Amino acid sequence: MNTLRIIIEKSADSYGAYAESIDGIYGAGDTLQEAKKSIDDAILTVKTFEKHEIPKALLEEHELKFVFNTQSFLEYYEKILSRASLSRLTGINEKQLGHYIQGLHKPRKDKVEKIERALHDLGQELLSVELS
């Protein structure tokens, strides 16, 4: 199965999305969900083209993988994960996380990987939880 990477970026007033490897697949919305829906709609539209015009990746079975830039992810999920909790998870101080969220500094690759690793670890931990 093909994996189509969809890049999600936050602007001042909306979210933009585009397929990393397929020209012409763009989306946008006021919310993250609207941007994702817009991408789905764009893919469905392209699939209505003549077969020779449809990119090969869309003809094959595929799944979408949404890829955030770090600032967009942190800004979006700040409503759920406070800076204090992100700091505890990642070991990156709250002030520095704030700089990343506000776009004052761009995190180095090792910091991006540290944030991603901490979030994946949290996700794995949550997947193993059972409530009674």
Image (cartoon, rainbow, N blue to C red):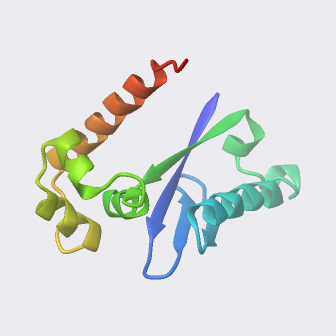
Residue in the picture at 43% in, 62% down: 76
- Residue 72 seen in the current view: yes
On the picture, is 88 further left or further right than 126? left
Residue 53 screen position, x and y as percent: 79, 56
Residue 89 found in image quarter: top left
- Residue 24 seen in the current view: no
Residue in the picture at 49% in, 82% down: 13
Residue nearest the viewer, comparing 82 with 113: 82
On the picture, is 67 further left or further right than 19? left
Residue in the picture at 63% in, 67% down: 27
Quadrant of the snapshot with the N terminus: top right
On the picture, is 10 further left or further right than 41? left
Residue 104 found in image quarter: bottom left
Residue 50 screen position, x and y as percent: 88, 56
Residue nearest the viewer, comparing 85 with 119: 85
Q: Is residue 81 above or below residue 113?
A: below
Q: Is residue 75 above or below residue 22?
A: below
Q: How many marks?
A: 0
On the picture, is 106 further left or further right than 116? left
Residue 12 screen position, x and y as percent: 43, 82
Quadrant of the snapshot with the C terminus: top right
Q: Going by the picture, which residue comes out furthest to the front?
A: 132
Residue 44 screen position, x and y as percent: 81, 55
Residue in the picture at 53% in, 76% down: 14
Q: Is residue 48 above or below residue 66?
A: below
